[in-house]
Amino acid sequence: MHESRRRLQPARHLGLLLMATDKTAGAQQVGVFFFFCMLLSFSTMEAYGKWLSQTFPVLQVVWARYTFHFILIVAVMAVLRVLGRGPRFHRSHRPRAQIVRSVFLFGMTFFYFHALARLPIAEATAIIFTAPLIMSVLSGVTLGERVGWREWCAALIGFVGVLIVVQPFALIAAMTGNPDALPPGTLTGVAAGITGAFLFAFYMLSSRFVSVVDPPETGLLYSSLAGVVATSATVPFDWQMPDAAGWGMLAVIGGFGALGQYLAGFAFARVQASKLGPLTYIQLLFAVSYGILLFDTVPGINTLAGAGLIVLAGVYTYRRTARS
């Protein structure tokens, strides 16, 4: 009884009221909406980060993503405390899990931004889409969620779509002595993207594990602090001094990152990871749109064909899991 009271007490603030673990159909629809908004926020951050990497070193962009994220969440916490409505977000019920989750997110961001700097945004995003496939497999082992054979088949189809996008034959040719088979930096970008995909899958799984006991603000604080500590030690060696406009541009990316993570906490607290994972494929549509609008990169037939398989597999898997 005392434990229940202790956990319900923080629900007086807005964060935990929104992430209440209600399993009704209405609550799950709200969770899906939060997840959709999270995808849009992260897609915007990634496109913006790719654009910034044309001016600033990638490590400096990652540093800005976490530093301004940290400043923003601390400022919000301070305002809430002044208003007498701010609980102690730095106190987690699962601090070790929060730390591990933060390390996963930082690693994913670091490698993914390197992939974005070297690959077209649609291709880099498609590689990251191996993360939901990995998460769907691991959710049955780590979270005890049911994954049937039909979901496995859909996941394999989605993986085939990813292979079509990244052109495996050209990759093999480039790795076996034909450097002209792919543009410079492509192999490094693909390797960075695959590493980021694995870390992203672990981040999503750990988000489900901590979101049911901690408010989203706690995860925001832990993850931003981990990124600040990790990047601040090395960014002076790869730094380009920005002007006033440059500082403003660097600050924006932190805002998008904080918003995306905040929404992720709400979504994973309401809906099972195996149900949300396939919806991540929608982000490919955002990536293609940003590639066309911001970078004048029209996806080729292989990207469109692979993306089609990925989206179809994701939608089918979601419809299957939504009925369970």
Image (spheres, grey):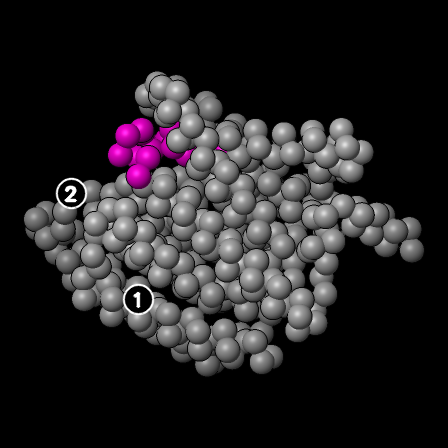
The boundaries of the magenta stretch are 51-66
For this rendering, which residue is in front, 203 or 63?
A: 63
Q: CA distance from mark 2 to mark 1?
A: 24 Å
Q: Residue furthest right?
A: 1
Q: Is residue 272 left or right of residue 130?
A: right
Judging from the image, what secondary structure is the residue with disc 2 in?
A: loop
Q: Residues within 10 Å of mark 1 (few under 14, many from 20)?
A: many
| Quadrant position of the C terminus in the picture | bottom right
Amino acid type, residue under disc 2 in the picture: Pro
**In which quarter of the view is residue 107 placed?**
top left
Helix, strand or loop under label 1: helix
Callout 2 crowding tier (Cα within 10 Å): few <14, some 14–19, many ≥20: few
Q: Identify the residue under disc 2.
A: 184
Residue 102, given in percent of the width and then of the height, sits at 55, 41
Tag on residue 5? none
Q: Quadrant of residue 238?
A: top left
Where residue 308 sits: x, y (%)? 31, 71
For the question of whether residue 225 can be seen, the reply is no
Q: Which residue is mark 1?
A: 307
